[in-house]
Image: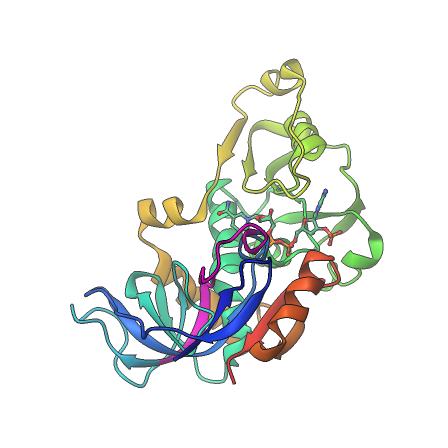
């Protein structure tokens, strides 16, 4: 079969590779679409030749898992894999797999696993309540756009933080009460923080008493120096270290969460914010566009 593999020079190529050999807990999926995430495209820069990226997949079950778990043969699915998904076929754990609801385009579904689950679980880690004041950094990105919508859907008052106003032009339509260019002043019960550096430092100063800063990214790649006094004076405030796979392993909610997100998307309650939708034969250009920050939202590849 064919797969996108690292060419060892920072890019990818479609090459012939061995067929996947699923574990007992994995289904073999004929992949229809995949989405691209920052850690995958960044990793290509230093990846050895033949490394196989790809966590977000949607497609059809060819062979169900041998242990009897997960959807049956022929079912449309969306799933979070552990790599190797940018391919014609992939072995994917059923614990992170959900049935595709009727009417949901496979490309839209493929945006949900990493970005959607991160947004959903990070809000949960922040103990989101309907009346909470929520601040979301990186709001113009894939995770940020899902987080804005999910928090607003749950009744929170959402402030979306962007670097440039034009990249957040549609965030009010997605549910943000206001857009802030750069970190605002104020007080917030839940802060989803993925920019790192000075943004994380500012978050620790504007979190409310008993509020939570959920740190899940460092897009700025900068270290953080923060004023300890302005943080500990917010008695009971917490800094939560969020990493998707350990979070899902601990909670065991991957399949359930994906089904929930897919149902929301199919029902028109979750915009998948696809900005780039191309064939996997154009993966090189798509990756370049992501790295150059020309994509606002999600990029997907159709395995055609
Ligand atoms: N811990 C986990 O399990 C986990 C899971 C998923 C993602 N992540 C991380 O979460 C972050 C967001 O993921 P994503 O998929 O949403 O990425 P994305 O679609 O590339 O979006 C990145 C966001 O960060 C902003 N940004 C980039 N550089 C910045 C900087 N120097 N200062 C402030 N903001 C900056 C971007 O703003 P512009 O639009 O202006 O460029 C955009 O809003 C990434 O760092 C990713 O690696 C972590």
Kindly give the residue lying farthest to the left in the view shown: 67
Residue at (79, 45) in percent of width and height = 180
Residue 180 appears left or right of 122: right
Residue 53 appears left or right of 200: left
Query: Quick one: 251 or 177, which is closer to the camera?
Result: 251
**How far from the left and from the top, in percent, is residue 112?**
50, 65
Can residue 49 be spotted in the picture? yes
In the rendered image, residue 102 lying in the magenta stretch gets the answer: no
| Majority secondary structure in the magenta region | loop
Residue at (54, 26) in percent of width and height = 237
**How far from the left and from the top, in percent, is residue 7?**
54, 63
In the rendered image, residue 48 lying in the magenta stretch gets the answer: yes
Query: Quick one: 208 or 184, which is closer to the camera?
Result: 184
Is residue 119 shown above or below 62?
above
Residue 145 appears left or right of 185: left
**How far from the left and from the top, in percent, is residue 196?**
64, 36
Residue at (63, 53) in percent of width and height = 144
Kindly give the residue lying farthest to the top in the view shown: 229
Query: Quick one: 171 or 116, which is closer to the camera?
Result: 116
Can residue 267 be spotted in the picture? no
Q: Which residues are magenta?
A: 43-60
How many marks on residues? 0
Residue at (33, 73) in percent of width and height = 18
Is residue 197 shown above or below 130?
above
Residue 124 appears left or right of 163: left
Quarter of the picture containing the N terminus is bottom left
**How far from the left and from the top, in percent, is residue 56?**
47, 65
Residue 276: name its quadrant: bottom right
Is residue 78 shown above or below 166?
below
């Amino acid at each position: 079969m064919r797969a996108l593999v690292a060419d060892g020079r920072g890019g990818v190529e479609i090459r012939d590779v061995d067929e996947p050999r699923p574990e007992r807990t994995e289904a073999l999926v004929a992949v229809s679409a995949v989405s691209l995430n920052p850690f995958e495209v960044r990793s290509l820069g230093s990846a050895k030749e033949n490394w196989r990226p790809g966590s977000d997949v949607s497609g059809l079950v060819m062979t169900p898992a041998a242990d009897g778990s997960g959807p049956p043969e022929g079912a449309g699915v969306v799933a979070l894999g552990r790599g190797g998904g940018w391919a014609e076929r992939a072995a994917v754990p059923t614990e992170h797999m959900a049935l595709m609801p009727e009417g949901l385009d496979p490309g839209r579904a493929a945006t949900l696993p990493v970005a959607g689950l991160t947004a959903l679980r990070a809000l949960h880690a922040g103990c989101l309540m309907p009346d909470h004041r929520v601040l979301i950094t990186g709001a113009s990105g894939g995770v940020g756009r899902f987080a804005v919508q999910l928090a607003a859907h749950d009744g929170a008052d959402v402030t979306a933080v962007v670097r440039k106003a034009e990249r957040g032009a549609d965030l009010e339509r997605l549910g943000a009460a206001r857009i802030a260019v750069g970190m605002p002043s104020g007080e917030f019960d839940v802060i989803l923080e993925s920019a790192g550096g000075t943004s994380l430092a500012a978050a620790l100063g504007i979190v409310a008493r008993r509020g939570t800063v959920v740190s899940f990214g460092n897009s700025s790649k900068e270290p953080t120096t923060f004023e300890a006094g302005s943080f500990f004076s917010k008695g009971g405030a917490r800094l939560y270290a969020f990493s998707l796979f350990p979070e899902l392993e601990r909670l065991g909610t991957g399949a359930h969460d994906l089904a929930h997100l897919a149902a929301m998307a199919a029902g028109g309650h979750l915009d998948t914010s696809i900005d780039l939708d191309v064939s996997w034969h154009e993966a090189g250009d798509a990756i370049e566009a992501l790295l150059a920050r020309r994509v606002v939202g999600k990029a997907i590849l159709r395995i055609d």
